[in-house]
Every structure is written in C-alpha cells, then in structure tokens.
Image (cartoon, rainbow, N blue to C red):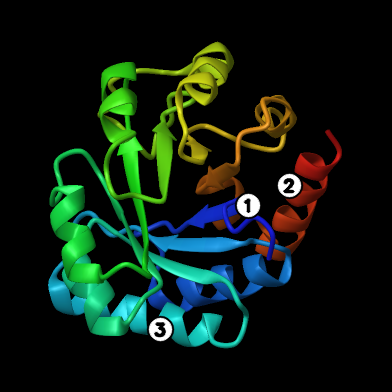
C-alpha cells in the first residue's frame, strides 16, 4: 500500500467486542488503510482481549494494527505499532522497547509540540484536533484548516489529521494534501462501516 495513513480508523472504546470486530472487518473491506485501537478507561486484560480480537480480524489484510498509548499491549499482541499522546511514555523510550521496525505515532496539540516532535524517533504525527469533537473533551487547540496547512509547512514528518472529520468536511482536509486522515464516529457509528469507508475514501481521492 502506497500510503498506510490515507484512511485511518480509530476505534470507539464504548462499542462491545463483537461490534468492534464487525466495524473493523467492514471498514477494512471499505478501504481503511490503518486501524488504531483506542481504550482510555480499561484494564490491561480487557484491552489485551480487544487487541487480540482485532488482530485476528486484520490477519492477512495488510492493514496495520496500532495500539493507542500502551507499549505493553502492543508488545503482548505483536501489533504493528503504537500511537502515543503527550502524557504517555516518552517517544525515545517507546522506540527502544518497540525496536526500529514498528510504527510509532505521536499526537501534537499545538505548534510548540509540533516543532519539538520533529527530532523524535517517530514515524508520523497526529494533528489533534482539527475540529472540536465529542470524542475528545480535553482539546487544547482546534487547528482548523489554516492551522493544518501551516503544520504541513512546518513538519518533515507525515501528518495525520484527526478530530471532527466527516463526509461533509473530508474533502477540505484532503485538499491540504495531508498524508493521513483519521476518523472515529464517521465510520464506527455509521449503519454500514464498509459503505462509509468506501464513500470517505472516494471523497479523499476525488480532490
């Protein structure tokens, strides 16, 4: 796959494991290129169970499995990578534990973090949040389209836009030529995750 970040699914921790697996399976059939399991309020065992289940769904698909925040879970299930937040394990320690071949992402929430991240051993940066969203209540900054365009000029690392992105505004985001677009609700909460993913991918490719 040319661009693994193109259509990046972030899962909804409120969905039960059967729904989670259904959403991931359908989304991959619809063209999702990367899947991140995000579990903020859960035990190690619960997260591990969900990560194993999603890994088996992704088997043979060529779609990378990324674990949010937790290097221990990623190592336990041999996931393809980890996505860190600003308050998680420092990136250089995560890289040492994961080794050189795993994907490592980091969320940046303002320009200062964006600049500091340029020298870190990460593969991509999540620009959060483009638009404010109910799934993320502690947003520091709403980047907006202008902020995203400026971030792209300042970053040597690939960027993944996330936050409040849906079928109505995804073309605006795609027009910035950002390397990746991540979505939660627009796929997880649709009646058909496969059709939603297909439509979103078509909208990205149409610009």
Q: Classify residue 185 as left or right of residue 120.
A: right
The secondary element bearing badge 3 is classed as helix
| Among the two numbered marks 3 and 1 on one chain, the one whose residue lies closer to the N terminus | 1
Q: Residues within 10 Å of mark 3 (few under 14, many from 20)?
A: some
The secondary element bearing badge 2 is classed as helix
The secondary element bearing badge 1 is classed as strand
Nearer to the camera, 194 or 171: 171
Quarter of the image for residue 197 reads bottom right
Q: Classify residue 99 as left or right of residue 61.
A: left
The residue at which mark 2 appears reads as 200
Would residue 40 be seen by someone viewing this image from the given angle? yes
Q: Residues within 10 Å of mark 2 (few under 14, many from 20)?
A: many
| Among the two numbered marks 2 and 3 on one chain, the one whose residue lies closer to the N terminus | 3
Q: CA distance from mark 2 to mark 3?
A: 25 Å
**Residue located at (47% from left, 87% from top):** 56
The residue at which mark 1 appears reads as 7
**Residue located at (14% from left, 41% from top):** 87
Image quadrant for the N terminus? bottom right
Quarter of the image for residue 67 reads bottom left
Given the current orientation, which residue lies at the most extreme top position? 146
Nearer to the camera, 34 or 93: 93
Mark closer to the observer (3, 1): 1
| Among the two numbered marks 2 and 1 on one chain, the one whose residue lies closer to the N terminus | 1
Q: CA distance from mark 2 to mark 1?
A: 8 Å
Q: CA distance from mark 3 to mark 1?
A: 21 Å
Residue 199 pos. (x, y %): 79, 50
């Amino acid at each position: 796959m040319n661009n693994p970040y193109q259509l990046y699914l972030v899962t909804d921790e409120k969905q039960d494991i059967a729904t989670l697996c259904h959403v991931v399976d359908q989304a991959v059939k619809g063209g999702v290129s990367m899947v991140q399991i995000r579990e903020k309020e859960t035990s190690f065992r619960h997260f591990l169970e969900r990560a194993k289940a999603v890994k088996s769904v992704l088997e043979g698909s060529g779609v990378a499995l990324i674990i949010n925040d937790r290097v221990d879970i990623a190592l336990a299930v041999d996931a393809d990578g980890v996505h860190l937040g600003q308050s998680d394990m420092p990136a250089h320690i995560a890289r040492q534990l994961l080794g050189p071949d795993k994907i490592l992402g980091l969320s940046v929430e303002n320009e200062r973090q964006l600049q500091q991240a340029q020298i870190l051993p990460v593969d991509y940066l999540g620009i959060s949040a483009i638009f404010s969203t109910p799934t993320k209540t502690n947003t520091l900054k709403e980047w907006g389209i202008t902020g995203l365009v400026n971030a792209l000029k300042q970053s040597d690392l690939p960027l993944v836009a996330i936050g409040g992105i849906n079928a109505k505004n995804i073309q605006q985001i795609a027009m910035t030529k950002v390397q990746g677009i991540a979505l939660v609700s627009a796929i997880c909460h649709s009646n058909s995750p496969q059709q939603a993913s297909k439509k979103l991918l078509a909208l990205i490719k149409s610009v």
